Amino acid sequence: SQKIEQNSEALNIQEGKTATLTCNYTNYSPAYLQWYRQDPGRGPVFLLLIRENEKEKRKERLKVTFDTTLKQSLFHITASQPADSATYLCALGINAGNMLTFGGGTRLMVKP
Amino acid sequence: GAGVSQSPSNKVTEKGKDVELRCDPISGHTALYWYRQRLGQGLEFLIYFQGNSAPDKSGLPSDRFSAERTGESVSTLTIQRTQQEDSAVYLCASSLYREKLFFGSGTQLSVL
């Protein structure tokens, strides 16, 4: 069956360090992968999209990689700040499908 | 409006009652999605509307769940004969292109 796995345990890091979150998937052939940020009591907010033919995408302090051989995406936040503390969700989309399928999310805690 | 608006923000109901949740998408967005998020979980796809095409209802968990959308405007999600297992946050999202979703803040449904 199709699965999207994100580490369900919270990731705790020190301010200024690089946070790395992982998204693994099985039995998918996604055309693109997205990352969203979700704060408590709010809906997810779009951060980045990376397509299957792209290896890496950057936006300010954010970097996403997409390895279709390993079936994995890594999401990096460099020079992390306490304000980056949130839950981060990955989502897969396929061209022929209608829905965007989400992973369970990983909670990031950045300590000052 | 500037963003996706959902109402009510909170809904407490008794088991067996019907509830109706409303979503106002961003003006001009042709696609509209409903997701369910149980406490501490990821997003579970419910239903997708795209313009005047037949909706993708593949995620609706039972025939107690239904949704409507009038053209490219407001959508309502109806849950009949609510059960305690229906307690969750119901998130609506809209998009201009399928790839980037804009979410509302959700409706927190509590079934007593």
Image: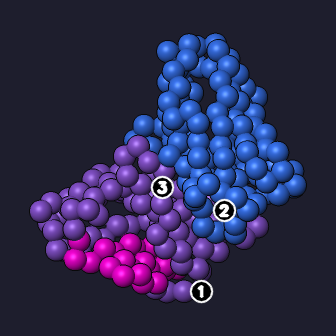
Is B74 placed above or below B81 here? below
Q: Which residues are magenta?
A: A57-80
Residue that label 3 marks: A44
In the rendered image, residue A8, in percent from the top left (x then y), is placed at 35, 51
* Residue, disc 1: A53
Could you classify mark 1 by the number of other residues whose Cα lies within 10 Å: few (under 14), some (14-19), or many (20 or more)? few
As drawn, B82 above or below B29: above
Q: Colour of chain A?
A: purple
Chain label for disc 3: A
Q: Quadrant of the N terminus of chain B?
A: bottom right
User: Along the horizontal axis of the image, is A52 left or right of B62?
Assistant: left
- Towards the viewer: B45 or B79: B79
Q: Chain of mark 2?
A: B
Q: Residue at x 41, y 54 (%)?
A: A38
Q: Amino acid at mark 2?
A: Ser
User: Which residue shows up at 42% across the image and 37% down it?
Assistant: B39
Q: Chain B drawn in what color? A: blue
Helix, strand or loop at label 1? It is loop
Q: In this rendering, does residue B25 appear at all?
A: yes
Q: Does A78 lie within the magenta span?
A: yes
Disc 3 + disc 1, Cβ < 8 Å:
no
Left or right of residue B5: residue B38: left
At a point 79% along the width and 39% down the height, the residue shown is B68
Q: Which residue is mark 2?
A: B95
Which of the two marks, 3 or 1, is nearer to us in this view? 3
